[in-house]
Amino acid sequence: MGKGLRAIDLNLVPVLRALLQERSVTRAASRVGLSQPAASNALARLRTMFSDPLLIKDGRAMVRTPFAERLLPLLELACDDLEQALLAKAWSPERTSRRFVVVMADHLALKVVAPLRTALARDAPNITVRFGAMGAKLHEELRQGRIDIAYVSYSPALDDIIEVERVSRSKLVAVVGPDHPFAARPPRSRAEFLAAPRFGMRIPRALVGEEQETLVTLLGSSNMAMEAGVAQFSVLPGLALATGCLTVTPLAIASVAVDTLGMRIVEIPETEEYFELCAFWNSRYRLDPGHQWFRKLMTGLVRDAFDPV
């Protein structure tokens, strides 16, 4: 181990990754094109090399040792980066067939879908995009690579091997219907504001950090028996109008409600909170040329749609 890479047979690296991911000598052998005896021999050499059993029996299954658990994400990242670096020159959007999964709130999807379709038809006709659902397992799905990019509020809970890019920032304001009391006289205090019935949305606790309690409170329902889902920002003004309540949204969405629904914008007293929109993706895609191209395209469209202030 002290000799670094010189002490490692790099031909064993793909076998090591397959063994740790599959936790089965048979499946790993099939995946890398080796016979089972050859894969077993490779595992024996790797155990000697690392002075660790790597995989141990647990009933009928094989489980990774603590060392192997720590090693696997680093190994995956290194292998993915190397593979993408070797493939970078051969990649081009017009020749690529690939599907990307994107998660974002509905108001963003409504604004980006038309320009995205135009851009893909022009530059990457074989790339397809699926808009996935946002939920409490977002971190897990990003980590496992089932979601390529998520455009959500900044969350310190989404860290680990997740990359983040701040995309835009919009001030949080309240919107009310023309007959709401706050339309004629804005609230004089934060207590008065918080006491008013508010139609909000439920944000899964797994997606927020302790320092975001104020944001969660303002965006949530209060004195109401109803709430919207986390991806339904665009429907909040209409729901607030229908129920005679107020709702809190980014200024970009509130401005649309003023223009289309005749609602009024109300400043939140004694505080100035912002909704910070970020792009999150798995670190394994950092050097992936296809992901880089798609990420740049999507983030540009989202910035235009979010209308930063």
Image: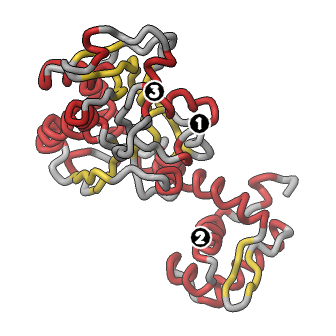
Residue to which mark 3 is pinned:
166
> Where, quadrant-wise, is the C terminus in this rendering?
top left
Tell me the number on the disc at residue 130.
Answer: none
Circle 2: residue type: Gln
Q: Which residue: 26% across, 9% down?
A: 184
Q: Is residue 42 left or right of residue 52?
A: left
Would you say residue 291 is visible in this rendering? no
Instruction: Name the element at disc 1.
Output: loop
Residue 284 position within the rendered picture, expressed as x and y whole percent measured from the top left: 52, 49
Residue to which mark 1 is pinned:
156
Q: Is residue 99 left or right of residue 60?
A: left
Residue to which mark 2 is pinned:
21
Within-10-Å neighbours for mark 3: few <14, some 14–19, many 20+: some
Is 282 placed above or below 217 here?
below
Estimate the spatial distance between the alpha carbons at disc 1 and disc 3, rounded to whole Å: 13 Å
Instruction: Name the element at disc 3.
Output: strand
Q: Is residue 38 left or right of residue 147?
A: right
